[in-house]
Amino acid sequence: MTQICDFKLGPLNHVGVAVPDIEAAAQHYRDVFGVTDITKPQDLPPQGVTFAFVNLPSGQIELIQPYGENSPIEKFLKNNPKGGQHHVCYEVDDIHEAKSVMEARGMTVLNDPRIGAHGTPVIFLHPRHNQGVLIELMEKQINTDD
């Protein structure tokens, strides 16, 4: 097992942006920034969001809109009606190890590992321990194309 002091974040995967209207937000990226590679919105009921990825040469923007009655995005949008940066996502090798290490380091982990928008397990770390930033840790995807 990896020593707790050896644990490190992997690469930045995406920045999550909460939006009140995902179609309008995607159109904004097309019209204003000339982005042509934007995924179709998909619902992720267990997390209470509809999401789409804006694919850029250097990474992704995850557009997230509330889905369902108890979406965690609702409260964020009440405080930020036009939307805004919601979270930053970093990759980790092993989500269960990451959860254990983060708890041992005094972080408040907001959930048990669950499947996120990329189809891999994720956890979220409370912003109070991270300079006000909600951090998502995502188990990195295994490339099976090799």
Image (spheres, grey):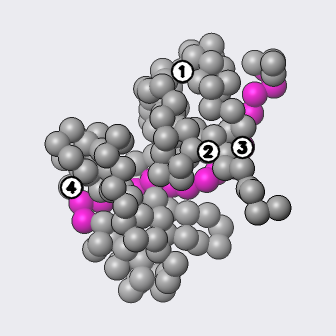
Give the alpha-carbon distance from disc 2 to disc 4, as whole Å.
26 Å
Identified at 68% across, 39% down, the residue is 92
The first of marks 1 and 4 along the sequence is 4
Contact, mark 4 vs mark 3 (Cβ under 8 Å): no
Identified at 28% across, 74% down, the residue is 24
The first of marks 3 and 2 along the sequence is 3
Q: Secondary structure at mark 2?
A: strand
Identified at 31% across, 46% down, the residue is 45
Task: Please name the amino acid that badge 1 sits on.
Answer: Met
How far from the left and from the top, in percent, is residue 63? 40, 61
Contact, mark 3 vs mark 2 (Cβ under 8 Å): yes
In this rendered view, identify the residue nearer to me: 80 or 67: 67
Give the alpha-carbon distance from disc 4 to disc 3, as whole Å.
32 Å
Horizontal side, residue 124 vs residue 77: left or right: right
How far from the left and from the top, in percent, is residue 123? 51, 33
The first of marks 2 and 4 along the sequence is 4
Q: How packed is label 1: few (under 14 Cα within 10 Å), some, or many (20 or more)?
A: some
Task: Please name the amino acid that badge 3 sits on.
Answer: Gly
Q: Give the residue number, with chain letter if any, for mark 4.
A: 81
Q: Secondary structure at mark 4?
A: loop
Q: How packed is label 4: few (under 14 Cα within 10 Å), some, or many (20 or more)?
A: few
The first of marks 4 and 3 along the sequence is 3
Identified at 33% across, 56% down, the residue is 43
Q: Using the image, tell me which numbered label, if any, was put on residue 90.
A: 2
Numbered range of the magenta stretch: 5-21
Location of the C terminus by quadrant is bottom right
Q: Give the residue number, with chain letter if any, for mark 3.
A: 10
The first of marks 1 and 3 along the sequence is 3
Give the alpha-carbon distance from disc 1 to disc 3, as whole Å.
18 Å
In this rendered view, identify the residue nearer to me: 21 or 83: 21
Task: Please name the amino acid that badge 2 sits on.
Answer: Tyr
Q: Give the residue number, with chain letter if any, for mark 1.
A: 107
